[in-house]
Amino acid sequence: MKVMWKKLVEEMKEGSVRALSRLITGVENREPGWMEAMKLIFKDTGRSRIIGITGSPGAGKSVLTDQITYQFAEQGLSVGIIAIDPSSPFSGGALLGDRIRMKMSGDLGSVFIRSMATRGALGGLSQATRDVTKILDAFGKDIIIVETVGVGQDEIDVVKTTDLVVVVCVPGQGDAIQAIKAGVMEIADIFVVNKADREGADQVAIDIQGMLSMSASDEMPHIPIIKTVATQGEGIQDLTDNISKILESRERKTSREIEHLKEEILVLMEREIASSVRSRWEKNGDFDALVQKVLDRQSDPYSVVQEMIQPIQAQLGE
Ligand SMILES: Nc1nc2c(ncn2[C@@H]2O[C@H](COP(=O)(O)OP(=O)(O)OP(=O)(O)O)[C@@H](O)[C@H]2O)c(=O)[nH]1
Ligand SMILES: [Mg+2]
C-alpha cells in the first residue's frame, strides 16, 4: 500500500499518535517516499533536547528513564522515549511506588515510547535513531530520551549525536572502569552510579573520579558523578538538575551541531549512492556476472567497484 506521507505528516503535526507511529514505522523501514516525509518534517525540528542514556545491560537505565521522565513531566515538559533493543520492558512507572504511579498515569499521558531493534535497521542504527528523534521533535516533544545498552560501536554512535550523554555504572561488576567500554567513557557528560543501595557504590564513584582526573584538562567541562537508587527515586532530582543545567549551558547551532549535521549529510549521501548503484547492478543481473569474473580471477573486487561507480565519477567530472 502506498503511504500517504503528506497526509500522515499533517495528522502527526496535529497531534495524532497513530500518525506519529505510522510515520516512524514508514521511515524506519525506508518505505518509498520516506525522504519526502522527512523533508516536510525537518523545518519543524531543532526544538527538542535529546538525552542519551547508556550503560551495561541491567544497570537500571529503564528505571532511571522512567524516573527522569516523571521529573520532567512534573515540570510540564513532554517526553518521548526511544529504547534501542530493550531486553527488559519499560515499566511505565510500575516499579515506582503507588503514590508516584498514580501521579504518573495522570501526568504522563503524553509520554511516547518507541522500541527499535539494533539489527537490521535500514540505513544504519544511528541514522534510524536520528530520524525517529526528528519525527518526535516535530511532533512537539520537549525532551527525547534515547536508551541504549553501551556495548558496541553502533550503540556508541547512537548516543554520540545526542545533546547530552548519561553513562550508567553499577557496583558489583568487578572493576567498574573495565566494565565501561572504551569509547563510552569519552562521550559521558554525566556519570550515574546507580544501585547505590548496594555495596561498593562509593568505590565505583571514586574509580570514575580517578579516571576522570587522569584525563582532566582545563578545557574539559566538569563531569558530575551522581549516585542514585533508581528504584527508590533517590538522587533523581540531583540528576535531572544536572541534566537541565548542562542542557541550558549548551547553545544551539554550535560547532558540535555543525559537525553532527555534516556527518549526517555525508552518511545519508553515501547510503543513497550505494543503494542506487546496488539496485542498478542487481536489477539487470550484471552484478552476478561481475562476481563470477572475480571468482574466476579474471577480475578483482577493486576493478569491479571502479566499474560500478564509474558513471557517477564521470558525472562528477572525476
Ligand atoms: N537494588 C537496585 N535495583 C535496581 C536499581 N535500579 C534498577 N534496579 C533493578 O535492576 C533491574 C534492571 O533494571 P532496568 O531498568 O530494566 O535496567 P536496564 O539497564 O534498562 O536493562 P536493559 O535495558 O535490559 O539493559 C530491575 O530489576 C530493576 O528493578 C537500584 O537503584 N537498586
Ligand atoms: Mg532497559
Image: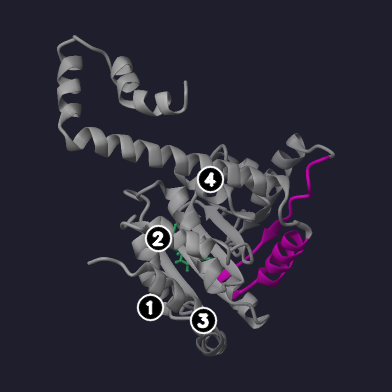
Q: Give the labeled residue for mark 2.
A: 86
Q: Nearer the viewer, residue 158 or 290?
A: 290
The quadrant holding residue 262 is top right
The quadrant holding residue 144 is bottom right
Q: CA distance from mark 3 to mark 4?
A: 29 Å
Q: CA distance from mark 1 to mark 2?
A: 22 Å
Q: Residues within 10 Å of mark 2 (few under 14, many from 20)?
A: some
Q: Amino acid at mark 4?
A: Glu
> Which of the numbered marks, if any, corresponds to residue 110?
3
Q: Nearer the viewer, mark 3 or mark 2?
A: 3
Q: Give the labeled residue for mark 1.
A: 18
Q: CA distance from mark 3 to mark 1?
A: 13 Å
Residue 303 located left or right of residue 90:
left
Q: Nearer the viewer, residue 115 or 91?
A: 115
Q: Can you tell me whether the CB of the residue at mark 2 lies under 8 Å from the nearest atom of ligand 2? A: yes
For image coordinates 46% across by 44% down, the residue present is: 268
Decide which of tag 1 and tag 2 comes sooner along the chain.
Answer: 1
